[in-house]
Image (cartoon, rainbow, N blue to C red):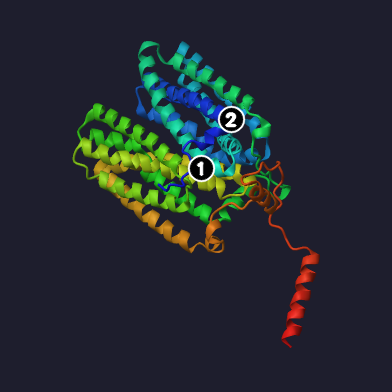
Amino acid sequence: MRASAAPMFRALKHPNYRHWATADFVSVTGAWMQNLALNWFVLVKTGSPGMLGLSLFFQTLPGVVLAPLAGAMADRWPTRRVLLTTQGLHGALALVLAGIAWVDGPLSVVYATALIGGVVTVFDGPALGRFGSQLVPREDLSNALALGSIISSGGRILGMGLAGALVVVTGVPLLFLLNALSFAAVLFAISRVRPDGMFQLATSAPGRAGAIAGLRYVFGHRPLVLLFLLSFVLSCLGRNYQVTMAAMSAGPLQAGAAGYGVLSVVFAVGTIAGGFVAAACKQLTLRLVLVMALLTSVLQFFSGAAPTLGIFAAVLFPIAVGAVVLDTATSTRIQLDTDEDMRGRVLAAKGMVTALSGAIGGPLLGWLSEVSGADHALEVAGLVTVLATAVAWMLFARSPQRRAMPAHTRWAHLVPPSAATAAEASGGSRRVPDRPSRGPLRAGPGRRLTRRLRSRRARLSRK
């Protein structure tokens, strides 16, 4: 790490982000408590892992169908108002699940609640991303995302630990109730955010509004499409660690449930370490995305040959670190390298890619593990992701949109000239008023006439 690296926790110097980070940790902890409670409730009630998978399907299905519409809404409507609605609905749904679990209600109501929760999550995600990027200036966004990874990992460990201890003593209704209460912290934090301390993003002009305009924007930017395709392959074959860890522990390693627990702890600690590594980086560049993708893919390939639980855990730890750095860098590039007025729709497209990869990757890796063994499944998946990363690297290097930009601004969002000038004059970022995006400036008639006169003078001087 270079000596010029910025402070690891620099995003916390902004009061709005501090309020939000605290509430986010409480909410993530409650969310993981509910995840464990919901999975356990369905599994005990049905005794079928397949029915549990159906619950997960209902939660992810809306993300595939409604993501473009949700992204357009996030770019058009005030994010604070959207979040107050979606977070309140999440809390209400948690109360409904608590009531269902208390009276041992029918499974159909649980599935309906999961489906409604999936719909709310679709609209919540892009708004959360756009809202979070307004809590810090542009130069601190990557650090805020990295700290968010630490918060998510820490909340996951705490939430699952508390849920595992409480579910035996109190049962699942209390876990749903605690998650409902956690949303009160989020609603309070949103109300505490000061509008004058927010860094507003541009809003879409009429010609760039709507879901279709968002899809046209995504497919019109080749680097963005390549990044989404690479993320899809990596998520399908290199991100379903719960499947591969369980399969390796039960199969080649012969470590059983205890070994799976050890691997889960190692992976969780690795994700926290990865968050600190990402937070310590001054810049999270596209090159870092590709390097981390290649590193985690190579390590995944060799993890399939691990002969013992200890060796597999030793390889799994840097995989977890690299995965968090990779995901944080990818999210940073997606947010910073797209136009502000399109950010919600681009984040929604990312959510769609994540939902599709999760729906396809889990069953695919499970099938590979059954057919060829978990160790060979890891080797095959690692080899495919290595090749995909290599191809993506070459295509990024040949991208005409990337080569056309100056070296210091490649794949970087260019702020409007007036805002950039003001930021440079003040020595940092400037809060830009909420404004419609007008697109690139064109030369007016006066400029064109001046150019013609200069060209004519040059021709006369040569004669």
Please name the residue that numbered disc 2 is placed on: 15
- Give neighbour class at mark 2: few <14, some 14-19, many 20+ (Cα, 10 Å): some
Q: Considering the numbered disc 2 on the image, is that residue within a helix, a strand or a loop?
A: helix
Residue 321 in percent (x, y) is at 36, 40
Observer-nearest of 184 and 39: 184
> Relative to 382, does residue 51 appear above or below in the rendering?
above
> Relative to 318, does residue 101 appear above or below in the rendering?
above
Report whether residue 112 is seen: no
Q: Quadrant of residue 357?
A: top left
> Relative to 341, does residue 11 appear above or below in the rendering?
above
Question: Of the residues shown, which amino acid type is indicated by label 2?
Answer: Pro
Query: Which callout, 2 or 1, points at the residue further toward the start of the chain?
Result: 2
Q: What's the mark number on residue 142?
A: 1
Residue located at (77% from left, 79% from top): 456
Q: In this view, does 90 lie to the left or right of 234?
A: right
Q: Considering the numbered disc 1 on the image, is that residue within a helix, a strand or a loop?
A: helix
Camera-near label (2 vs 1) is 2
* Quadrant where the image shows the C terminus: bottom right
Residue located at (35% from left, 32% from top): 269
- Give neighbour class at mark 1: few <14, some 14-19, many 20+ (Cα, 10 Å): many
Question: Of the residues shown, which amino acid type is indicated by label 1?
Answer: Ser
Q: In this view, does 70 lie to the left or right of 354?
A: right
> Relative to 398, does residue 15 appear above or below in the rendering?
above
Report whether residue 4 is seen: yes
Q: What's the mark number on residue 77?
A: none
Observer-nearest of 146 and 311: 146
Q: Is residue 270 left or right of residue 211?
A: left
